[in-house]
Structures are given as C-alpha cells and as structure tokens.
Amino acid sequence: MSNKVTGYNRTQIILHWVIAALLVFQFVGNGTIVGVYELINKGETIESLPILARGHILLGILILTLAVWRVYLRLTRGAPDLPDGKSAAQKVIAKFTHITLYAAIFIMPLSGIGAWFGGQEIADTVHTTFKFVFLASIALHFVGAVYQQHVLKTNIIRRMTKAE
C-alpha cells in the first residue's frame, strides 16, 4: 500500500502491543484449556471451568475484537511503506509474514470459537494445527524486526514504539 502515512498512530501501536501481550498469555496458558477440552470430548462433565480456561476463551474473543479494530484502522488510515533499500525478496517475505499474521489473528479465535462453542472437530483441528503456522510467523516477524533494526539499521522498531 503506497501512501503518505509515515508512521503508526498511538491507537495502532497500542493495539499491536496489547494483542502481542494477549497472544503470549494464550500460548503460555493454553495447557489448561486443552486439558478441559480433552475431558469434555471424553464425555466428562466439568462443574466449573478453571480460571485459565475461562481466560483463554475470553481473551481469544477479545483478540478477535481488537483484530477487527486493528484491520479497520489499517484500511481507513493506512500503514507506512516499508523502509527504503529493501530487496525484492525482503519485501515479499515482509508482505507474506504480515498477511499470515493478520490471517492468524482471525483464524485462531474463529476456529477456537467453532471448536469450543460449536463442538466442530474441523475447527479444533484448524485451531490446533494453525498455531504452529502462527508461531512461525510471529518468530519470523520478530527476527525480521530485530534484523532490520540492528543489522540493516532501518530504525524500524521506532514505528511501533513512537506514535506519528
């Protein structure tokens, strides 16, 4: 997207970091929800959900809501162009990584909702399998940002830490 936006605004930056923090909790604390889900699938009755399981469900819905807001802002406000001097391969990798990340912040909560509330086995399979794609794209995003910041010296991290 070519535009005149030179940086992200405060809301875009806050949404980026809030979603990132919530994702850390989702991945670190997912063992409880997996255990409860497996018990339910075995036909066991769960009297009350452990707080970490409830948190996983609620935060997944919150991530989806924040993702909608984030995409809305990106579509209406735009995003800065990639830094100058990037090779064609770097541009393709950056674009692919961002598309995968945006897709994942929708696919993961939607498939989780389908698995938990709809009991859909295919949703559970997507949710369980896609987390590896999501983790790989998060890792690539992180490594790319660190590489650009410290090797290419593009000062790219400033775009997500200082509002325009």
Image (cartoon, rainbow, N blue to C red):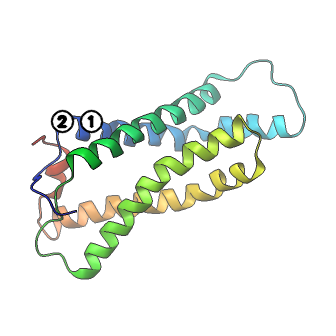
Q: Looking at the picture, which amino acid does disc 1 mark?
A: Ile
Q: Circle 1 sits in a helix, a strand or a loop, which is it?
A: helix
Q: How many marks?
A: 2
Residue 16 visible at all: no
Considering only vertical position in the picture, is 131 above or below 154?
Answer: above
Q: Position of residue 150 (x, y in %)?
A: 17, 64
Considering only vertical position in the picture, is 45 above or below 90?
Answer: above
Q: Mark number for residue 10?
A: 2
In the rendered image, which quarter contains the N terminus?
Answer: bottom left
**Labels 1 & 2 near each other (Cβ < 8 A):** yes
Q: Position of residue 50 (x, y in %)?
A: 67, 23
Query: Which quadrant holds residue 164?
Result: top left
Residue situated furthest front in the rendering: 76
Residue occupying image coordinates x 28% and y 42%: 73
Residue situated furthest top in the rendering: 47
Give the distance between the C-alpha atoms of the residues marked 1 and 2, in whole angstroms.
6 Å
Q: Mark number for residue 24?
A: none
Q: Looking at the picture, which amino acid does disc 2 mark?
A: Arg
Residue occupying image coordinates x 42% and y 56%: 101
Q: Is residue 6 left or right of residue 26?
A: left
Considering only vertical position in the picture, is 108 above or below 32?
Answer: below
Query: Which quadrant holds residue 147?
Result: bottom left
Q: Position of residue 76 (x, y in %)?
A: 25, 45
| Mark 1 lies on residue | 14
Q: Is residue 5 left or right of residue 68?
A: left
Task: Give whichever of 154, 105 is nearer the camera.
Answer: 105
Q: Is residue 127 left or right of residue 80?
A: right
Residue occupying image coordinates x 10% and y 71%: 84
Residue occupying image coordinates x 52% and y 39%: 26
Query: Which quadrant holds residue 70?
Result: top left
Q: Circle 2 sits in a helix, a strand or a loop, which is it?
A: helix
